[in-house]
Image (cartoon, rainbow, N blue to C red):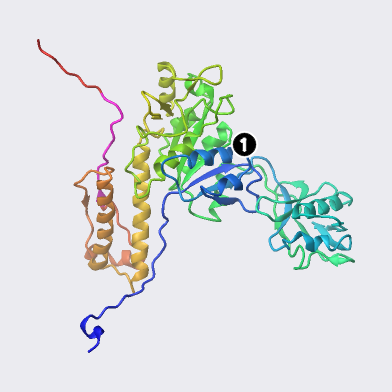
C-alpha cells in the first residue's frame, strides 16, 4: 500500500495579479541625477547616498525619509524640467570598457546628425584611462567641429554616454549619429552603437512631469516636490487632487504665518483640497537654518511606510525624528516656538506645523486644507486599491463572471473583508452596512453593457481622531 492511498494531497496553481504593495513616495526635482531620458530612478535605503549627489534636495529628502523608525522599500526621484532642456541622444548599448576606445587612438569617427545637417566627428582617444575620459575626448572633437561646437558629451548619472546639443525646447532638431564618410565606424555595435534620440523639453509644469513619470510606472502614490513656484505648486495640488494620489508639501514661505495671502497655502486652502498636506517649517536652507529639515519626507518614512497600517496611525501626535518644532530664531540657529498669532494664521490657511510640547516632536493636527484627516484619506485610498485588486484577481481566476448572485456575493465578501480591516485599524466605525443588489434587479439593457455598476453599496462612518481636549473637574471642600 502506498502513502498516497492514505493521504491524497494536491496543490493547484492559479493566476493572480501582483499587489501594489505599500504606498510608495516620489520626489519631483530638477537635477541631472535623474537624466531626462530616464525621467525616474529608483532608490532605496542602501543605495540613495551613492545614487544621488551630495548637498542636493533629493539627497536631503532621502536622508529624512530613511531616518525614521519605519522605512519604505523604495522611493522614486523623478525629473522635472523647471527649465528647457536640450535635445540629444543617449547610447544604451555602448561598449563599457574604456580601453576599447583607447585602442582606436585617432582612427575612429562618427557622423553627427542634427535635423538636415551632418558632419563627421573624429575623436582622439589616445591616453584615455576611463569611460569619462572617452566622453571628454568625444566632447573635444565636437568642439573642433562646425555643427557640434557647443555640444556636450558626458557619462550621465546612469552610466550611459550622452551627447547633448546646444538647442533646447521641444522644437529643437533631433540628434543622432550614423556611419561616417571614412574611418572606423563608432556607430557600430562594438563601440557606441545605435543612438536613441532624446527630445528637448520646454519648461513644464509639475503635473506634466508627474504625467511623464506615470507613463513609465504606476507605483508612486505620495508625491513631494522641490523648486516649484507658488503658482506651480498650487496647480500641482489641483492635478493630484483629481487622481488617487496624495501630495505632501513643505512650506518655508515666511508670509504663510502672516495675514499676507500670496503663499500657496492660502490658494490651496481656498480650493479645499483633501489630497494635499502642507507642513510649515522655518528650518530650511532657504531661510538659513543650521539644518535643512524635510517634514514631508519624515511623515512618509515614519507613518505612511508602516506595513499594513494604512488608515491606522494619526498624522498628528505621532513622534517624528529628524525635525524640530517649526519656529526659528532670527539668529538662524535657535529653535523656537511659533507664536499663538502665527499658529492662528497658519491654521487659517490650512497649514500643519511641528510642535514639541515636552520631549517629542510631532505634527499639530494632521489635517488637509479641506479639513479631513490625512489618515482617513490614505485609509480610503488603501480600501479602494485593495478592492480593485480583489475584484480583478477574482475575475481573472474565474472562467466567466456573470450577473449572478454567486458572483455578487463574492464581491460583497471582498467589501466585508477590507471594511473589517479598517474597523480594526480604527478608521471606520463598526456597524457599517452593505446593500448588495440581487442579480434579478439588473435589467437586460444594463447587462448588455457588460459593465457591472454598483452604486452606494457600502455605507460606513469614519472614526475621527482626538488631537486635543478640554477637561473640567470640580473638587468640593
The correct choice, above or below, for 263 with respect to 11 in the image is: above
Residue to which mark 1 is pinned: 55
Residue at screen point 22% across, 89% down: 1
Q: Is residue 466 magenta?
A: yes
Q: Which residues are magenta?
A: 458-469
Instruction: Please tell me which residue is depicted at 24% across the width and 65% down the height of the picture.
Output: 439
Secondary structure, magenta segment, majority class: loop
Q: Nearer the viewer, residue 443 or 291?
A: 291
The quadrant of the image that shows the C terminus is: top left
Depth check: 149 or 295 in front? 295
Relative to the observer, which residue lies in front, 1 or 19?
A: 1
In front of the other: 439 or 290: 290
Residue 450 locus on image (x, y percent): 36, 66
Residue at far left of view: 477
Residue name at image x 23 percent, y 57 percent: 436
Is 405 magenta? The answer is: no
Q: Position of residue 160 (x, y in %)?
A: 69, 56
**Percent from the top left, x then y, of residue 97?**
74, 61
Q: Is 97 situated left or right of 276 in this image?
A: right
Q: Is residue 78 visible?
A: yes
Amino acid at each position: 500500500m502506498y502513502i498516497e492511498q492514505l493521504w491524497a494531497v494536491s496543490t493547484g496553481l492559479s493566476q493572480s495579479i501582483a499587489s501594489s504593495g505599500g504606498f510608495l513616495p516620489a520626489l519631483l526635482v530638477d537635477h541631472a541625477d535623474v537624466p531626462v531620458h530616464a525621467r525616474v530612478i529608483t532608490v532605496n535605503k542602501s543605495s540613495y547616498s551613492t545614487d544621488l549627489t551630495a548637498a542636493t534636495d533629493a539627497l536631503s529628502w532621502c536622508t529624512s525619509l530613511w531616518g525614521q523608525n519605519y522605512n519604505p522599500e523604495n522611493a522614486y526621484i523623478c525629473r522635472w524640467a523647471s527649465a528647457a532642456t536640450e535635445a540629444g541622444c543617449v547610447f544604451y548599448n555602448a561598449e563599457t570598457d574604456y580601453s576599447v576606445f583607447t585602442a582606436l587612438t585617432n582612427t575612429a569617427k562618427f557622423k553627427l546628425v542634427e535635423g538636415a545637417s551632418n558632419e563627421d566627428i573624429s575623436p582622439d582617444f589616445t591616453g584615455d584611462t576611463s569611460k569619462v575620459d572617452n566622453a571628454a575626448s568625444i566632447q573635444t572633437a565636437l568642439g573642433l567641429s562646425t555643427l557640434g561646437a557647443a555640444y556636450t558629451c558626458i557619462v550621465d548619472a546612469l552610466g550611459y554616454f550622452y551627447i547633448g546639443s546646444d538647442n533646447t525646447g521641444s522644437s529643437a532638431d533631433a540628434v543622432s549619429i550614423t556611419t561616417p564618410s571614412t574611418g572606423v565606424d563608432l556607430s557600430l555595435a562594438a563601440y557606441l552603437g545605435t543612438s536613441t534620440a532624446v527630445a528637448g523639453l520646454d519648461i513644464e509644469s509639475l503635473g506634466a512631469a508627474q504625467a511623464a513619470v506615470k507613463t513609465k510606472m504606476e507605483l508612486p502614490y505620495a508625491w513631494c516636490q522641490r523648486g516649484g513656484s507658488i503658482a506651480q505648486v498650487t496647480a500641482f495640488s489641483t492635478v493630484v487632487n483629481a487622481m488617487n494620489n496624495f501630495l505632501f508639501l513643505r512650506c518655508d514661505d515666511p508670509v504663510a504665518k502672516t495675514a499676507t495671502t500670496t503663499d500657496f497655502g492660502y490658494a490651496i486652502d481656498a480650493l479645499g483640497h483633501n489630497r494635499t498636506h502642507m507642513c510649515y517649517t522655518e528650518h530650511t536652507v532657504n531661510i538659513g537654518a543650521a539644518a535643512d529639515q524635510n517634514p514631508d519626507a519624515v511623515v512618509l518614512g515614519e507613518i505612511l511606510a508602516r506595513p499594513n497600517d494604512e488608515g491606522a496611525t494619526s498624522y498628528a501626535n505621532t513622534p517624528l525624528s529628524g525635525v524640530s518644532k517649526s519656529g526659528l530664531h532670527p539668529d538662524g540657529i535657535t529653535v523656537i516656538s511659533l507664536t499663538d498669532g502665527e499658529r492662528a494664521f497658519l491654521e487659517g490657511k490650512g497649514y500643519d506645523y511641528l510642535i514639541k510640547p515636552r520631549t517629542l516632536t510631532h505634527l499639530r493636527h494632521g489635517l488637509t486644507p479641506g479639513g479631513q484627516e490625512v489618515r482617513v484619506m490614505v485609509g480610503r485610498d488603501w480600501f479602494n486599491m485593495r478592492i480593485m485588486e480583489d475584484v480583478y484577481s477574482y475575475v481573472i481566476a474565474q472562467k466567466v463572471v456573470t450577473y449572478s448572485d454567486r458572483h455578487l456575493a463574492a464581491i460583497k465578501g471582498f467589501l466585508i473583508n477590507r471594511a473589517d480591516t479598517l474597523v480594526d485599524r480604527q478608521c471606520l466605525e463598526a456597524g457599517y452596512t452593505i446593500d448588495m443588489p440581487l442579480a434579478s434587479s439588473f435589467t437586460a439593457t444594463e447587462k448588455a453593457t457588460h459593465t457591472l455598476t454598483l452604486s452606494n453599496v457600502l455605507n460606513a462612518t469614519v472614526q475621527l481622531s482626538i488631537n486635543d481636549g478640554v477637561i473640567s473637574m470640580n473638587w468640593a471642600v
